[in-house]
Amino acid sequence: MKTKQIVLFASGSGSNVENIIRYFQDKPNVTVAIVLTNKRDAKVLDRCNRLNVSALYFNKVAFKDTDCVLDILKGAHPDLIVLAGFLWKIPEKIIKAFPNKIINIHPALLPKYGGKGMYGAKVHHAVKENRERESGITIHYVNEYYDEGTIIHQAKIEIRPEDSADAIAEKVHALEYAHYPRIIAELLTDH
């Protein structure tokens, strides 16, 4: 059986990246080929070093203006490209090169609270301000628009009136940990 290759993109601390790496560590048929980040000082680089996973920093020019990142991806032969806290919009040339192979996780129930600038704490504060009774995660394919790709999976949490934005974030983060690696595994089985 051929080993499935995952490429991860991250911009921040990499807690979801670490969760995904650990989930697949004891699965011989899945390998995290490389983690790519657009931040030179991202904590995800430290996590990858600790977990013995290749990681690489790239800048905006490499990502958008040249084929540098695209060439790295082609060389990795990914079965799935997974965005885990990655904040830049994916260039159309990468989307076209890997159709239905790029997925993202959003910390809300799309189509609500999606779009440019809606990420992390901003989402949870908006959910709280609007007195929503539920929130959750949306795992979706990436297309050329922020948070508008086909939805693969959603999971919900209940929000109590006394929940702060931080409490909402904690509940949503728990959903990310529980569902993202499992859905990735299911998608790899289907590909």
Image (cartoon, rainbow, N blue to C red):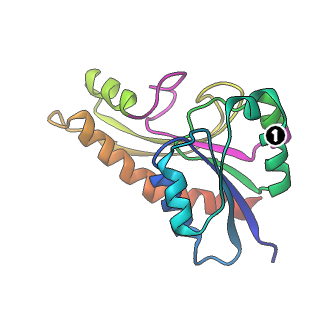
Residue 98 falls inside the magenta stretch: yes
In percent of width and height, residue 84 lies at 55, 46
Q: What residue sits 43% from the left and 35% below the top?
A: 108
Residue 60 magenta-highlighted? no
- Residue at image position (14%, 35%) is 162
Q: Position of residue 148 (x, y in %)?
A: 62, 28
Q: Find numbered disc 1 in the image and state the secondary structure of the residue it sits on.
A: helix
Q: Position of residue 52 (x, y in %)?
A: 59, 69
Relative to 25, say whether 90 is above or below: above
Nearest the eye: 3 or 183: 3
Q: Residue at x 34, y 23 (%)?
A: 126
Nearer to the camera, 50 or 143: 50
* Up/down of 110 relative to 82, above or below: above
Q: Which residues are magenta?
A: 97-120
Quadrant of the image for the N terminus? bottom right
- Local packing at callout 1 (Cα closer than 10 Å; few below 14, some 14-19, many 20+) is some
User: Label 1: which residue?
Assistant: 68
Q: Main secondary structure of the magenta part?
A: loop
